[in-house]
Image (cartoon, rainbow, N blue to C red):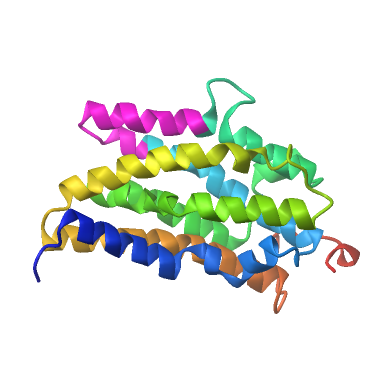
Amino acid sequence: MRAMSPDELEMRLRQIGANRYHRLHPFHKLLHGGKCTKAQVQAWALNRYYYQAMIPVKDAGLIARCPDSDIRREWRRRLIDHDGERKGEGGIARWLMLTDGLQLDRDYVVSLHGLLPATRFAVDAYVHFVRDKTLLEAIASSLTELFSPEIISERLEGMLNNYDFVSSQTLAYFSQRPPQAERDARFALDYVKANALTAGAQDSVLRALEFKCDVLWAMLDALYHAYVAPGHIPPGAFAPPQGDRQ
């Protein structure tokens, strides 16, 4: 198998996003189309919080084993984006504004007691992937950010137009995220194109992005199974009152 040119590799990566990114998932179609109940939106926000909270843990793990100071400096910006420079700032704080706005108890959200088991397993698998795989694979797994501005645009428009229990303030995470994602995706894509030069390395990059897409898809599979159909909520997971589920 011959090695691809950098532009051919980028085309293959973008094709993975076109075929496998979780904006295609039935749960997101319901969410963005205004078809979710408030309880289903709450369940999504609560479970997604764990993913948001573990992003800086994942990134700190990458930084800790990266020998290149230029990459470490670049990647530190991701920690600041999510953790903020001080308490109450950053992406995690803005996500908690969303869960607050959805009338979820903040202590309950942060405790993680209501997580679906599959959410925990999927997010932890991503953290372990970045910790254990090569630096090239770890960076490549972040390339879902190439596709996030489009899904964020859909989410903002769809949720603001269809749900009276959200506002532009509670959705502040999404309004501020696209320029960060575009910056981060460009750096990661340039790194991958410059360093994945053999057929084997390029294949590992493609598999890394597929893995990350699978993580995000699995999280939505779990949400759909628990809160849409067939509606089997695992013991201990967030369970809204029966009257709030319709």
Q: Position of residue 18 (x, y in %)?
A: 42, 66
In the image shown, does 186 or 131 lie closer to the viewer?
186
Residue at x 38%, y 49% (from the top left corner) = 142
Location of residue 144 in the rendering, given as x and y in whole percent from the top left corner: 42, 54
The percent coordinates of residue 95 (x first, y second) are 64, 40
52 shown above or below 196: above
In the image, residue 76 lies in the stretch drawn in magenta: yes
Q: Name which residue lies at 47% across and 37% down.
A: 180
Range shown magenta: 61-81
Q: Is residue 209 magenta?
A: no
Q: Quadrant of the C terminus?
A: bottom right
Q: Quadrant of the N terminus?
A: bottom left
Residue for point 34% across, 48% down: 130
**Left or right for 186, reference 117:** left
Label count reads 0
Q: Is residue 242 visible?
A: yes
